[in-house]
Amino acid sequence: MAVLVTGGGGFIGSHTCVELLQNGFDIVVVDNFSNCNPKSLERVKELTGKDFPVYPCDIRDLDGLCKVFDNEKIDSVIHFAGLKAVGESTQIPMEYYDNNVVGTLNLCRVMAKYGCKKIVFSSSATVYGYDNPSPLVETMKTGGVTNPYGRTKLMIEEILKDIAASDDEWSIVLLRYFNPIGAHESGRIGENPNGIPNNLMPYITQVAVGKREFLSVFGGDYDTPDGTGVRDYIHVVDLADGHIKALDVLNKKTGVAIYNLGTGNGYSVLDIVKAFEKASGNPLPYKIVDRRPGDIDVCYSNPEKAFKELGWKAKRGIEDMCADSWRWQSMNPNGYDD
Ligand code: NAD
Ligand code: UD1
């Protein structure tokens, strides 16, 4: 029996595939390659020395997904496939609702048809909205999300809860990620954004390899120790490990379980800049500019529930995150095209 990994070619998916294979799981990947390079999966095979089936398929394609379930013995699903750019989601909201919400519904329909009712879903800290104070705890109310991307995550969480309530055979884990950065320590797989990066770390690494002139630090007047935004950065390999632990829950109980995946520590933009300078050995040019609309001052997790119930804890600190992000970018200045 295999774990179906949707969006397995992407940043978090590819790292999770490595951890799954190294932990003895068989995997099957579905990806439409809309936001990844298929070479990421070649490198996963090379890193692990293991082969697995890859289906170039959109999760909205019902017949395509049915073929995957006809051909493979799927025991459970880790569902990463989705669009994730906040700014873009405000420009093309219909595409976001279709891809993320309709895509997930389609996937669940096919899973139900084949009697596969175990799913881990990639949710986000964004579902806590802007009103809850950090540290964020799973029991806090969700909502107050201000962009279509975030709303797709919230809607999917609600849909999955309704599915579990309607049929007690379903077992669903909602993982709320904080800010994943870093890369596999081999430097062979990492984050590979198209165009101008929206997120902090890929922007920093592109400045560091000379692709961009300087980092714009969005806001220096937040209510934080150094005035810049504070986030809970988590190493992508720690995040991937959290999925392995979540699979245990799927096999042990039904219903819905929700876990934060974060470190519980908040670091400012300038903390990350300093840690990155140390890792790369070079100064990183930056300018403090206006705040980015929609940003909040502070966002970090309380990760205790995942520790108590899953036995999961992030092991890597910001030094490792920066060193590994730098290794990936410096070994692959043009991403998977190198
Ligand atoms: P990513 O874009 O690197 O990976 C997503 C993958 O899904 C890509 O390979 C893409 O080609 C594929 N995909 C997209 N739509 C698809 C579709 N309709 N059918 C099949 N494949 C499709 O993103 P990521 O950073 O690896 O994120 C993975 C998941 O985690 C996403 O759902 C994202 O919203 C969620 N998440 C990410 C972050 C983050 O900071 N990276 C934070 C919170 C939640
Ligand atoms: C963003 C999304 C969030 C999504 C997450 C992962 C918003 C408002 N939130 O989170 O929904 O789940 O990405 O995809 O977009 N920063 C700079 N300069 C940059 C880029 C970022 O100073 O060029 C700062 C930001 O202001 C923030 C921090 O760095 O304080 C982290 O930003 P980012 O990596 O974009 O993540 P979030 O905004 O936390």
Image (cartoon, rainbow, N blue to C red):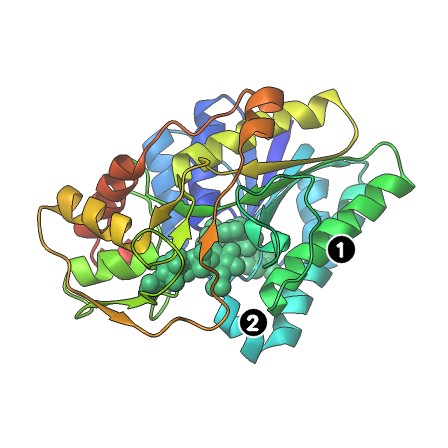
In the picture as drawn, the residue positioned furthest to the bottom comes out as 91
Badge 2, how many Cα within 10 Å: few under 14, some, many 20+? many
Whether pointer 1 and pointer 2 mark residues with C-beta atoms closer than 8 Å, the reply is no
- Looking at the image, the residue that sits furthest to the right is 166
Camera-side residue: 241 or 108?
241
- Locate residue 43 relative to residue 101 in the image: left or right: left
The image quarter containing residue 246 is: top right
Q: Where is residue 269 in the image (x, y as percent from the top left)?
A: 31, 55
Residue at position x 57%, y 55% in the image: 126
Which secondary structure, mark 2? helix
Q: Upstream in the sequence, badge 1 or badge 2?
A: 2
User: Residue 230 in the image: x percent, y percent?
Assistant: 39, 52
Q: What element carries label 1?
A: helix
User: Which label was assigned to residue 105?
Assistant: 1
Q: Residue at x 34, y 67 (%)?
A: 218
Q: Is 208 on the left or on the right of 239, as rendered?
A: left
Q: Which quarter shows the N terminus?
A: top right
At horizontal 34% and vertical 31% (from top left) the residue drawn is 316
Tell me the kind of residue under disc 1: Leu
Q: Quarter of the picture for ligand 2?
A: bottom left
Tell me the residue at 72%/42% (across/down). Answer: 70
- Kind of residue sitting beneath label 2: Ser
